[in-house]
Amino acid sequence: MIEGLHFAGAGLAFVLTSLALVLLQPVAARLNLLDHPDAARKDHAHPTPVTGGIAILIGCVVAFAGMQANGPGMQAFGAAAVLLAAVGLYDDLHDLRWYWRILAQVLAALLMIYWGGVRVEQLGPAFGLGELSLGWLAVPFTVFATVGLINAMNMIDGADGLAGSLGLAALAMLAAAALYAGNAGLASRLSVLCGALAAFLAWNVRLPWRPRAKVFLGNAGSALLGLVIAWVAFRLTQNPGHPVNPVLALWLLPIPVMDCLVLIVRRLQQGRSPFSAGRDHIHHVMQDAGFGPTRAAMVLTAVSLACGLLVAQAMRLDVPHPVLLAAYLLLCVGWYLLTRKRERAVALFRRLRGG
């Protein structure tokens, strides 16, 4: 029965999102909701609609309404999602300054905390401690983590299929973790999100008969995806009835978070804004090494899935959680050191591509 609900919700969201994508195509052209080519910053050669995030939001909202998932938590999530989508659309149209985007993200996080009752209150298991309550730091930490995840997804959204594939892999693994922990209700909601994201990817990835993406997530979509992952991760790791260790959440989205952290440190060292544009993301390094957008997305998604599955298995084998946290920090430090010389990182990926 539960499995049937999962498939039904995912299928409904897939159909609704696909329909929204079709209907929004002419609207995007009429309202100039298009991402125009920019040789200095972007790889695409044709104006492309940025309505993917709005279509995902429409598909999920209607699907959740059909499932009668309308409790306070879902209402808070819906309000936060609509806020980010609206600000993202405005940003796509008028190139909003970064501090206004951050303000909207902080407000969305506060809606999730005070209306939805979702916050990070315990970090003890991650450090091998039975109890490590954040106390009054719970709210600022939750806001910081939410804004960080939103911007990590925004920064990684620079190649066709990449952000969507990494997001779908993370949500699928979170759904599996929810089922393993006995949280079938959360898994059911995640199935809806996975269905909607899969529908978007069907339009976003490059295929042999379609050499370019038909639609992008847009700033609305990448912000929505980051919010979804934050909301689910916090619900899953802070639920005393169905506990999942917070360390696992890091390993379910290793690439975007690592890429974001390293770029922030490097740009600050260079005297640049962390939110400035540049071709210094991991997918740009891979493209310089000869990876096409689809192959880069497939490789990074496979790495993400492998990391999540290996760490989940390590937890089942009682590998100490501080060891897994230290391993993630070493991954970030290793990527930082490797990319201090870009040509060294390009050479490594070129060898991997050849192999």
Image (spheres, grey):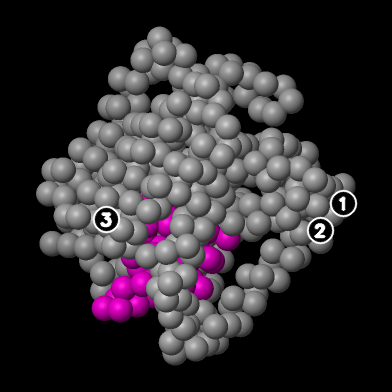
Picture quadrant of residue 148: bottom right
Q: Amino acid at mark 1?
A: Lys
Dot 1 falls on a residue whose secondary structure is loop
| Crowding near the residue tagged with mark 3, few <14, some 14–19, many ≥20 C-alpha atoms within 10 Å | some
x, y percent for residue 255: 60, 56
Asked whether, in this view, residue 212 is left or right of residue 65, the answer is right
Q: Amino acid at mark 3?
A: Trp
The range drawn in magenta is: 226-254
The residue to which callout 1 is attached is 341
The residue to which callout 3 is attached is 115
- Foreground disc of the pair 2, 3: 3
- What numbered label is drawn on residue 338? 2
Asked whether, in this view, residue 350 is left or right of residue 134, the answer is right
Residue at figure coordinates x 40%, y 73% from the top left: 121
Within the magenta stretch, is there residue 155? no
Kindly tell me whether residue 90 is visible in this rendering: yes
Kindly tell me whether residue 170 is visible in this rendering: no
Picture quadrant of residue 258: bottom right
Q: Amino acid at mark 2?
A: Leu
